[in-house]
Amino acid sequence: MVVDVWNRVPGAGVGVHWRGMTQKETPFMDGVPMVTQCPIPAHTTFQYKFRASKAGTHLWHAHAGAESADGLFGALVVRQPSSRDPQRMHYDVDDMDHVIVIAEWARGFALQRLADAHHKPSTGASMEGKNLVDTLLINGRGKLHP
């Protein structure tokens, strides 16, 4: 699998983690900044290259800061040849168009919302209901488009 990541997050390094992918012989492609790789600096690219050997439905997501909450995530579907699928006799159509990712979305950056909600001087007022989402997204689309 080859994925080119272009970091367009201003002033922040990113890394992409591939949930469910065993990084055998490629631990530096695991996407955990400051653990398995240096963060990808702003306005640069990085190429992830590894064997996606575990068939199934997985997830990729940012692994630093609150970038996942800001939308840096998605589905990762690794298919196997139908000849190797032990369930192939149970269905006659293999439709690849049914991947659904459901997420919450709110205006503004997640780290700023967190700071606004938890680090302002206390006024004694409750924070309940102050950090709500603006819309739900299905495959990146919602009532309000991010």
Image (cartoon, rainbow, N blue to C red):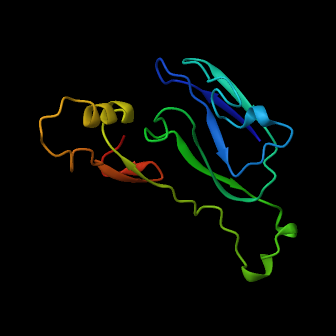
- Left or right of residue 71: residue 89: right
Q: Is residue 73 above or below residue 137?
A: above
Q: Nearer the viewer, residue 126 or 101?
A: 126
- Left or right of residue 52: residue 33: left
- Left or right of residue 115: residue 3: right
Name which residue lies at 37% across and 36% down: 110
Indicate the position of residue 140 as horizontal and vertical percent values: 45, 48
Q: Nearer the viewer, residue 33 or 120?
A: 120
Split into 4 quadrants, where in the image is the N terminus? top right
Name which residue lies at 49% across and 40% down: 68
Q: Nearer the viewer, residue 59 or 100?
A: 59
Name which residue lies at 65% across and 62% down: 96
Indicate the position of residue 18 as horizontal and vertical percent values: 67, 44
- Which quadrant would residue 127 be assigned to in this image? top left
Name which residue lies at 32% across and 43% down: 106
Split into 4 quadrants, where in the image is the C terminus? top left
Indicate the position of residue 141 as horizontal and vertical percent values: 41, 50
Indicate the position of residue 54 as horizontal and vertical percent values: 78, 56
Question: Quick one: which residue is furthest to the bottom in this view?
Answer: 90
Q: Is residue 75 above or below residue 108?
A: below
